[in-house]
Amino acid sequence: MRKTITRENAGGRAVHDVGGLDFGAIDRSEHDLALWEKRVDAMMILLYSKQGLWTVDAMRRTIESYGEQAYDDTEYYEKWMRAMRNLLVEQEVLGKAEIEAEMAEVAERHRKAGRSVPVHTVDWP
Amino acid sequence: MMHDHDHDHSHDHAHDHAGAGHAHPPQRDHDAGPMGVYEVMEEAVRTLLIEKGILSHAEIAVQMDLMDSRSAALGAKVIARAWVDLAFKQRLLADCRSALAELGIDIGQIAEFKVVENTPATHNVIVCTLCSCYPKLLLGIPPAWYKSLAYRSRTVVDPRSVLAEFGVTVAAEQTVRVHDSTADLRYIVLPMRPAGSDHMSESELAALVTRDAMIGTAVPAAVRS
């Protein structure tokens, strides 16, 4: 059997199907979650297990549909946050336009408070 | 994680500009650092969900506290019980859900748990190649490396070299069994009780059991008398 080594020769695999590939040495350092990451964790669990807005499988399907670059270049809770945004729109809980408008408002408020905030947004879905 | 780098970066600037006697800026670290776009998204989505009455500040806070309260200490308690009570160990291996219920632990309806036992012949290690499935209830939030592409990709194909990176040497004659977790079935390793621990109480034993020992990337050290 040919041993798959990297993304480049991973054939037609889906982006999340990385078992048997080789992404190099493991960074074993411990990280505490940032406050916003803890909030994402909490909100996600409340929305699917308490409110029943979607299942854990739907969340995985959403994350697995990101392109390879977005999948490899985003942190764990960034993937979760994007999934939450997309699923809230899919379930018609929130609209794309109101999320974009609120994000612009949040960014502007923090900029005025002297914080550096990126101008780019995150592609849909 | 990139956020830690951002954080350090802002400190560097403070040192560059502040001069002696003012080494640190006021306590504004988290507000003053660059804000990531996903952090902006989190605040925006949270604001909208609260405005619409879908979530409340209070329930988000309660859920965050609940996750903070979950740690490997609970898993360690289960392992220590299995070490001192052979009948319980057999039940735990045969039917994890019922055995945990005996200890007042309800694993809920999301997934089943399975305990895999280390023996002199077999070392077990858990991974989730597809995502990050993990027995959070017993071990808390998974470490970043468990969710990393490097750990997920290599553990199933070359577990001995992965274990070596963690400082675990598995004898050539010992089988390494890798368990690939799914959303519906999460594994936890029952490590071997370390040599020299015969005299120890159940709670002393629990203190020997680390998170990594229950993932399989560590082995409890022998106890020195």
Image (cartoon, rainbow, N blue to C red):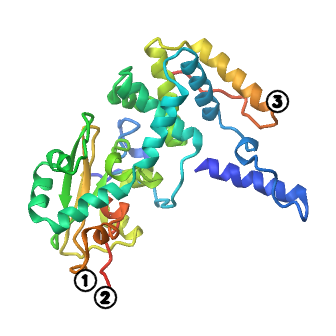
Residue for badge 2: B225
What separation in Å lies between label 3 and label 2 (alpha carbons)?
62 Å
* In this view, B68 is above or below B19: above
Instruction: Tell me the crowding category of disc 2: few under 14, some 14 to 19, or many 20 or more residues within 10 angstroms, Cα based.
Output: few
* In this view, A43 is above or below A32: above
Amino acid type, label 3 = Lys
What separation in Å lies between label 1 and label 2 (alpha carbons)?
7 Å
Amino acid type, label 2 = Ser
Regarding mark 1 in the picture, which secondary structure is present there?
loop
Residue at 49% from the left image edge and 16% from the top image edge: A89
Residue for badge 1: B196
Give residue B69's position: percent from left, percent from top.
43, 48
**Looking at this rendering, what residue extends furthest in the bottom direction?**
B225
Q: Are marks 3 and 2 in contact (CB under 8 Å)?
A: no
The lab-note entry on whether marks 1 and 2 share a chain reads: yes
Is residue B96 toward the left or the right of residue B24 in the image? Answer: left
Q: Provide the chain ID for the residue under circle 2.
A: B
* In this view, B170 is above or below A98: below
Is residue A49 toward the left or the right of residue A112 in the image? Answer: left
Q: Provide the chain ID for the residue under circle 1.
A: B
Residue at 75% from the left image edge and 31% from the top image edge: A110
Q: Nearer the viewer, residue B146 or B139?
A: B139
Q: Mark number for residue A112?
A: 3
